[in-house]
Amino acid sequence: MLKNILSPSPFGGRLFIQTLFLAWSLFIGLQFSLFVRHFETSGAMPYYSRPAGVEGFLPIGALVSLKGWLLGGGLDAVHPAALVLFVTFLAMALLARKSFCSFLCPVGTLSEWSWKLGERLFGRNFRVWRPLDLLLQSLKYLLLFFFVKIILIDMPLPAIKQFLAGDYWAMADVKMLQFFTNLSFLSGGIVILLTLLSLCYKNVWCRYLCPYGALLGLFSVLSPVRIRRDSTCCTACGNCSRACPSRIDVQNKLTVVSPECTGCMTCIQNCPESNTLQMSIGQKVLPGWSFVLLVTGLFASGVLIGMLSGHWETSLTYSDYQRLIPWLRHIGH
Ligand code: SF4
Ligand code: SF4
């Protein structure tokens, strides 16, 4: 594993970024829980500053915020980083496929590492029967449709403004933290079940249940960056199709436009013929390292624009948290 992370190839580069981002997510999760602990203990525990990046875990609220902004309600000041990160990830999907899933998402990284561990333990991964696989894949689109319906279609601007000004949205990040730190019996059971399934099957959560990935996948269909296969030097060995974690039949495609393609480059890595499978932009080859730089550059640009334009740190004050956190269990009931 360490050898792969440090490998001086675009594939090693992707693994390195995944590892870095997972570590960063864990770090901000820890820092945020210490921040919350300070208020839960009425200041008995030391104060730690709140990492704004934690708002990356609020995509549903960010969708509300995006609609409010597009309808002229202004930029939300309570969780501005949620909107900045949401728009950044959508832009990444538009320009660089679902690279958020294969480079940045900590859940995607843990999923990938789970099936790789399962492969070592059992000598292989299992495949869901194709018709059932297609049926299960529709679940994430149903979940996406549910959120699109209740937020983008049904929610009028006054309701959006009321939501964004309310205590529930102010505490959405703290509630999210509590969901993970105080898992109920049912939620814990679901997490264990998904973990066990992820050891046997590739990317169970991402492939079947994640509405965020479904949304990014639909945006990524428009991306000019695609995997392209040169049929003149392809030997039809099938390595690419067998290796693709998204079960895309790369061997029989000239370009991959599927919303399931995450731009992970595993197919390229497993192709024995040089320059046969390549990332491309339009008709031009996009070298692997350029793709890695494009992904990191898009992410860094989005965050920098948010920070420099003053849309990163929350408008909530110390006394807001002092007032709201002790009342958390009464908020939203
Ligand atoms: S087609 Fe290639 S880049 Fe796309 S998901 Fe499959 S292996 Fe990854
Ligand atoms: S791995 Fe390469 S050579 Fe083999 S089928 Fe895929 S594109 Fe062709």
Image (cartoon, rainbow, N blue to C red):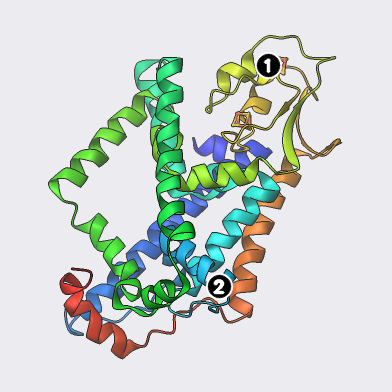
Say above or below: 100 vs 297.
above
Amino acid residing under circle 2 = Trp
Does the rendering let one see residue 203?
Answer: no
- Ligand 1 found in image quarter: top right
Q: Nearer the viewer, residue 240 or 246?
A: 246
Image coordinates for residue 123, horizontal then vertical, percent:
40, 15
Does the rendering let one see residue 281?
Answer: yes
Q: Mark 2 sits on what residue?
A: 69
Q: Nearer the viewer, residue 9 or 328?
A: 328
Q: Is residue 279 left or right of residue 209?
A: right
Amino acid residing under circle 1 = Gln
Residue positioned 78% across, 22% down in the render: 276
The image quadrant that residue 330 belongs to is bottom left
User: Distance of mark 1 from mark 2, alpha carbons?
Assistant: 43 Å
Residue positioned 55% across, 41% down in the render: 102
Image coordinates for residue 78, horizontal then vertical, percent:
43, 78
Image coordinates for residue 31, horizontal then vertical, percent:
35, 69
Question: Residue 251 bears which disc, if any?
Answer: 1
In the rendered image, which quarter contains the C terminus? bottom left
What is the secondary structure assignment of the residue under circle 1? helix
Disc 1 + disc 2, Cβ < 8 Å: no
Q: Is mark 1 within 8 Å of ligand 2?
A: yes
Classed neighbour count for the residue bearing mark 1: other residues with Cα under 10 Å, few (<14), some (14–19), many (≥20): many
Residue positioned 54% across, 63% down in the render: 85
In front: mark 1 or mark 2? 2
Q: Is residue 18 left or right of residue 37?
A: right
Classed neighbour count for the residue bearing mark 2: other residues with Cα under 10 Å, few (<14), some (14–19), many (≥20): some
Q: Is mark 2 within 8 Å of ligand 1?
A: no
